[in-house]
Amino acid sequence: MLTRSPATGALRPITEDLLAEVYLAPRVAQLCLVDHLGAGAPWSDSFAASPEETARAVEAGLLAVAHAAPMLDPAEIVTDTLPDGRARNHLDALRALWRDIGTLPDPLNTWRHVLQSKAADALEPLPTADPDCSFATPAEASLARTLRTHHGDADALPPPPLAAEGTALRNLQDRIGRHSDQFAPDPSVACHGLRDPREEAEFAAALAQSLLDTGRVDHPGEIGLLAPDGPAYDLPLQDAFDRVGLPLSGLPTEPAQRDQAGELLSLLLVLLKGPAPRTALASLYITPGMPWPAATGRRMARELIDRGWSRLATEQTGAARELLNAMRPCDTPEQLFARLGFIARAVPGADLHPRVAMLKAATGNEIDWPLLHRLAAPTAVAANGHDRFVEGVSLFSEGALPWRPVRQLIVAGMAGRHWPRPPGSDPFFTEGEIAMIRDTGLMLEGRKQKLARGLELFRRQLCAATEGLNLLVPAMDLRGDHLTPSTGLALIAHMLGTDEPADLVRDIRSARPEDWPVATTRPDPVPMGGAPALPKDGLIHIQRGLGTPDRPGIDLLRLRETKDGPLPHSPSRLETLLVSPLGWLLDELGAKELAWAPETLDVMTLGTLMHQVLEEVFPEGTEIPDDATRAARVPKALNSAIRLHARWLIDVAWATERASLLREARDICAAWAGFLRHTGAEVLHNEIALKGEHGGLLLHGKADCLLKLPGGRILVVDHKRSSAGGRRDRMAKGWDLQVALYRAMLERPSEETPLTRLVAEGAQVVTAYHMLRDGTVLSDAGGADVPRVETTGADAAENAMDHLAQVLAEVGAGTVRLNREGDAKAFEKERGIKAYALENPLVAAFTLPGGSYEEDSE
């Protein structure tokens, strides 16, 4: 509705704010139904199972019923003529709820105040200037009648300017949503197919510039842009029009804001409930306003994501240390709110005190975590106001009438759930029940009425244009999901005589750039499609200085060097070097994907847990536990391992996984106990640190278990959480590097330990793998006569050590050999190695076509 000022003749819309100011109406911020949806209502079972979703559905149903009551009074809901059944029960329940809460959210609460007021209560006259709308709800129609009764009618508005008679655009303005007669298309309506909303925004800006350049409009204010509401279009449109230098008139004066207090409080609840994922704690580290510098927070978060803990966080002092100490799980409301209060004082800029007080008021003797999370959930602060000025391209919103006429109208988003938005199913009543309710005089809107109202709004929006209409149709959304034509586009296509909406759409990408309706600039093609230029021989030489051949290459083995010398290399790093020297180099440089991800029960975590269980169930220097002792130790050892290495597994959501882990731990420990008894082995040590050298290269690693066999031999065991098949194949083909490197560290130690002293004194050492998935123990020829040890050949590392020597010589001279596309299959077939290093996207980007690594080596 519009009102015309009796003094100046100026028009302005009758908004909720205007009505509240003129009639001094009380404001209701939001409707809180949680305390009113108790037992006895038809939706009580749904509320018990899903309170938040049920409350939203009940609120939507209540608002729909209120719109159907002309005076916004629950007494207008009469169900006496309805037959007993579901419709009557739900309508009675909604009426009882309305009476119970006694209010409605704005704007309905403001409307009801106006309906109950007298003309003398208004502070200024509001004569209405537009005719009645046949699509208004009963409440809207009643409000319009009341305002006319109070203030009378202003001079009738002149009919809006429309397109010329007989044009396709004028036919759409007159008939869409009313008649389905077909008519011939003409240049007044164009339909362009784009990729997605971002490309739509770029095209809309270019089209607006083209309309100006070709003289089809005289200034930007004669162009209108009708766009769907939401972030998919808001920011892209602003950016696109900024790039072409055209101002957008109608943007919010205050853009949407994040609820940072709600975000922080929700994050704190996750941390204080515990056990919290590391991504939650990392998010706290980088939250603005914390008692540490932003750079410190980023470094702490990076360390936490990479290693599971942050050394820098442990070094914090003062207020930062106190805040981090407060991040401990809470068991009682007193603990929770004491810590929340302390955090609120430590981070004063977050303004947490009012939110914490609200949570405290809703908490009883126990902590209801789901309730607290719902109350603390952040809600975006909606955009406020509109910055409208004459000179800019007119931006019109999806749910409102255009605020001025234009010569050319661009409509974005003509696919998916827009123009008009399809009415959803009513959560309370079927269409048949709505028809019965309408027969009682309560004009509840069904799908038919909602769709007709939406189409009428779309028709009036199209009436803003006087010369041309450009429809933009995205093929997919920003997630890449394909979109179907909107209802409005389907109607327009039918009225223009096409069989399918797709027949009306002119795909920009399928047309020649010379035929585009906008100016184009074709960028130069990217050489080789963006692929890097790689040397044909597959060798990259990294040299000192300017890289001339007479200069020595950089010793890549010394990249990770400290003031005390180069850092030692682990067997796993050198295994990567065997597979991909480039992958190894990237690891040395720390060039890896810095993705944030929550903890997951991956292979590394599973292996760590089972290693810890074996250590605690079979401690060093003790007898092998009997069955009863072992059965009692395993659950305690698993719980201890979880608390030490994966506290997040304590959460109830991981109960199934914990049960599976317990079964696996029992099977592994039973098999290991059988092996120890059968061999007569004694556990000397668990988790043995090894340091040594091979060919001048410093090495370090850890052996999981050290066994003393009868006769004095030493069995160095590495637990692997996998089956024996792959490792057996690798050892049989002579490509198992770890066995030989363990032996090298024992024979040429750089640090003396009890184990190295035994070796120096002549003790025979056998290295082996304990495969946890099937209980197999694998060794090379040295373990041939050990009971229950499976040997796989004379030398399990012969080929691996020869190839390692070659690759070490190359990288030591600054040469990196690139991989080829056939390497992954060749490594698995010929070496028994799964080439995980080749899954690195950077390694894949620098992979040569065809062949395999072996061909280059030869």
Image (tube, helix red, strand yellow):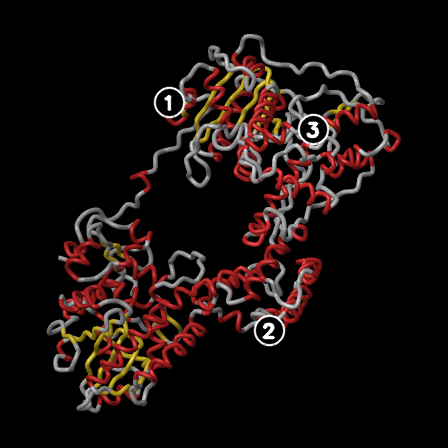
Label 1 or label 2, whichever comes before in sequence order: 2
Residue 124 placement, left or right of 822: right
Amino acid found under the numbered disc labelled 2: Thr
Local packing at callout 1 (Cα closer than 10 Å; few below 14, some 14-19, many 20+) is few
To which residue does mark 2 refer? Answer: 317
Q: Residue at x 32, y 70 (%)?
A: 664
Amino acid found under the numbered disc labelled 3: Pro
To which residue does mark 3 refer? Answer: 138
Give the residue furthest to the left.
Answer: 794
Q: Say above or below: 439 vs 745.
A: above
Labelled pair 3, 2 in contact (Cβ < 8 Å): no
- Evaluate whether residue 216 shows in this view: no
Residue 711, picture quadrant: bottom left
Measured as percent of width and height from the top left, residue 349 is found at 68, 59
Q: Secondary structure at mark 1?
A: loop
Measured as percent of width and height from the top left, residue 436 is found at 60, 30
Local packing at callout 2 (Cα closer than 10 Å; few below 14, some 14-19, many 20+) is few
To which residue does mark 1 refer? Answer: 512
